[in-house]
Amino acid sequence: MKNLISKHFLADRDIEQLIGLQLRYGVIISSLIVLAGGVLYLSQSGQLPLPPYHHFAGTKGGFTSFGEILSGIAAMRAGGIIQFGVVVLIATPILRIAFSLLGFVLEKDKMYILITAIVLTVMMLSIFGGLKI
């Protein structure tokens, strides 16, 4: 049985294929989640009368934190489901960078480990730096 951390367990091509599949499935899954939320939105509010477009009435922004998104999903609110699909779409390239970092660790390529770790850190700080929980 091959060692999990050995260089021969996962070749470069295997890691590239894994990353490609992850990107493809991430986009497909997020699209399906947003589609399901859109269908639910149309079924819940498709029969409502048209709003008066000559008068602007602002509304409170919803689903701005992860907790609100999860509570929206639990309550089967379409906006929460759609926002969750957007979160999955945003998480897809972050997971790609994490998988790349894992591949570079397995290859023991120190320069690319450092560069990828810096990119991942900058992305995480930019996303979670302004997040309200």
Image: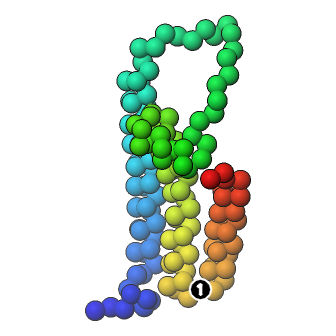
Q: Secondary structure at mark 1?
A: loop
Quick one: 34 or 27, which is closer to the camera?
34
Q: Would you name the residue on which mark 1 appears?
A: 109
Q: Quadrant of the N terminus?
A: bottom left
Q: Is the residue 118 above or below the residue 131 in the image?
A: below
Asked whether the viewer can see residue 34, the reply is no
Quick one: 88 or 73, which is closer to the camera?
73
Residue 59 left/right relative to 99: right
Where does residue 16 sit, x and y in percent of width and height?
A: 46, 70
Residue 84 left/right relative to 10: right
Where does residue 40 sit, x and y in percent of width and height?
A: 39, 30
Quick one: 17 or 126, which is closer to the camera?
126
**Residue 60's quadrant in the figure?**
top right
Q: How is the image coloured?
A: rainbow
Q: Is the residue 87 above or below the residue 123 in the image?
A: above
Query: Which class describes the residues within 10 Å of circle 1: few (<14), some (14-19), or many (20+)?
Result: few
Q: Is the residue 126 above or below the residue 114 in the image?
A: above
Residue 2 left/right relative to 61: left
Residue drawn 59% across the image and 36% down it: 62
Residue drawn 54% across the image and 49% down it: 67
The amino acid at mark 1 is: Asp
Where does residue 73 sit, x and y in percent of width and height?
A: 43, 42
